[in-house]
Amino acid sequence: MNRMIRCAHCGSLILSNPRVKDQRYCSQKACQRARKTLWQRQKMATDLDYQLNQRDCQKDWNKRNPDYWRQYRSRHPGYRTRNRLLQKHRDRRRRDLAKMDALAEISPIKPGSYYLIPAKGDLAKMDALSQKYFLIPSSYPFLAKKDSMDFLSAFP
């Protein structure tokens, strides 16, 4: 039995096709394209075999067309200009981020326990002094919380 339904993409009222049980889209090209895109997105999210097949097809296409993007950029200067502007924006945002491991090593001496032995004199001395060595960067007081700095006051 025919009934009136609203298209999930364009929102227009249509007469449903009795042969399509759960019809949600009208027959316009844009609506059918939206239906297919949604199906593919759901399939990629749930079906591992489909994902692997799509990835393999993409790799094969890239092997058959290695210069595609170079040629596309040369034929479309507007695309190239827009991409450069967007990349500058992305680079600017990335500079604002701080990585904990981004700093190069400040001192070649690693933190840890060391024995201090006099440089001159008897090297076979038995009373070497054991010390713990901590690396504290010069920017540490600005980065640390005030209450965590209290332990530094104990050191002369």
Image (spheres, helix red, strand yellow):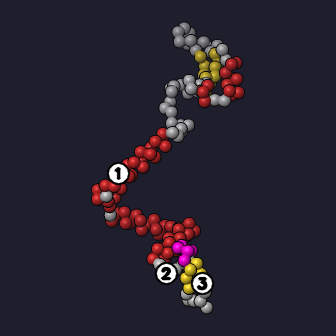
Name the residue type under label 2.
Answer: Ser
Distance from label 1 to label 2 (Cα)?
38 Å
Q: Percent from the top left, x then y, of residue 124?
A: 58, 13
Q: Position of residue 135 (x, y in %)?
A: 58, 25
Q: Which residues are magenta?
A: 8-12
What mark, if any, has residue 4 been given in the picture?
3
Q: Nearer the viewer, residue 82 or 123?
A: 82
Name which quarter of the figure residue 77 lies in.
Answer: bottom left
Q: What secondary structure is the stretch in magenta mostly built from? A: loop
Disc sitting over residue 27 in the figure: 2
The residue carrying mark 1 is 81
* Nearer to me, 112 or 84: 84
Which residue type carries mark 3?
A: Met
Find the residue positioned furthest to the top: 121
65 relative to 99 in the view: left or right:
left
Classify mark 3: helix, strand or loop.
strand
| Chain-order first, disc 3 or disc 2 | 3
Residue type highlighted by circle 1: Thr
